[in-house]
Image (spheres, rainbow, N blue to C red):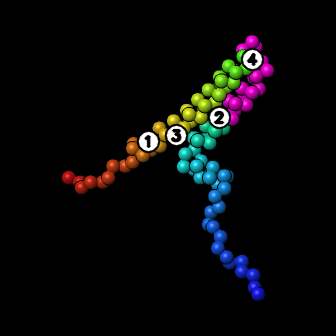
Amino acid sequence: MSTDNDGWSPERESTVGTKLLQKAQKSPLVPVGMVGFVVVAAYGLYRMKERGNMKMSVHLIHTRVAAQACLVGAVTLGAVYSMYKDHFMKQPPAGPQK
């Protein structure tokens, strides 16, 4: 009995890391937005101890809104860039010369 090492194997394994890399290649601003979200959320947590007399719930809401704005802004810039690339950077088809 021989061992068969030539069995079927998928060409690309679909892991979270490979999906993120594929998304980064298609739309590079999405990972930038995700990093911005994490940075703003970390900064908000860091500043929590120096919030003064502001209620914690209000501070957390402000932090969440700032983090979401960073992510939505990056996704919006990505969509605008994609539209620009699809509609304005296309070369017009070469027609017959007069």
Judge by depth and name the residue closer to the eye, 3 or 26.
3
Per the model, the C-alpha gap separating discs 1 and 4 is: 41 Å
Per the model, the C-alpha gap separating discs 3 and 1 is: 9 Å
Q: Mark 2: which secondary structure?
A: helix
Tell me if label 4 and label 2 are in contact, CB under 8 Å: no
The numbered mark at residue 78 is 3
Identify the magenta region: 36-54
Decide whether residue 4 is among the magenta residues.
no
Dominant SS in magenta: helix
Looking at the image, which residue is at 65% across and 61% down? 13
Judge by depth and name the residue closer to the eye, 62 or 26.
62
Looking at the image, which residue is at 62% across and 42% down? 31
The picture places residue 61, in percent across and down from the top left corner, at 65, 24
The kind of residue tagged 4 is: Arg
Tell me if label 4 and label 3 are in contact, CB under 8 Å: no
The picture places residue 96, in percent across and down from the top left corner, at 24, 55
The kind of residue tagged 1 is: Met
The residue to which callout 4 is attached is 51
Looking at the image, which residue is at 62% across and 52% down? 19
Compared across the picture, whether 70 is left or right of 5 comes to left
Per the model, the C-alpha gap separating discs 4 and 2 is: 21 Å
The picture places residue 88, in percent across and down from the top left corner, at 39, 42
The residue to which callout 1 is attached is 83
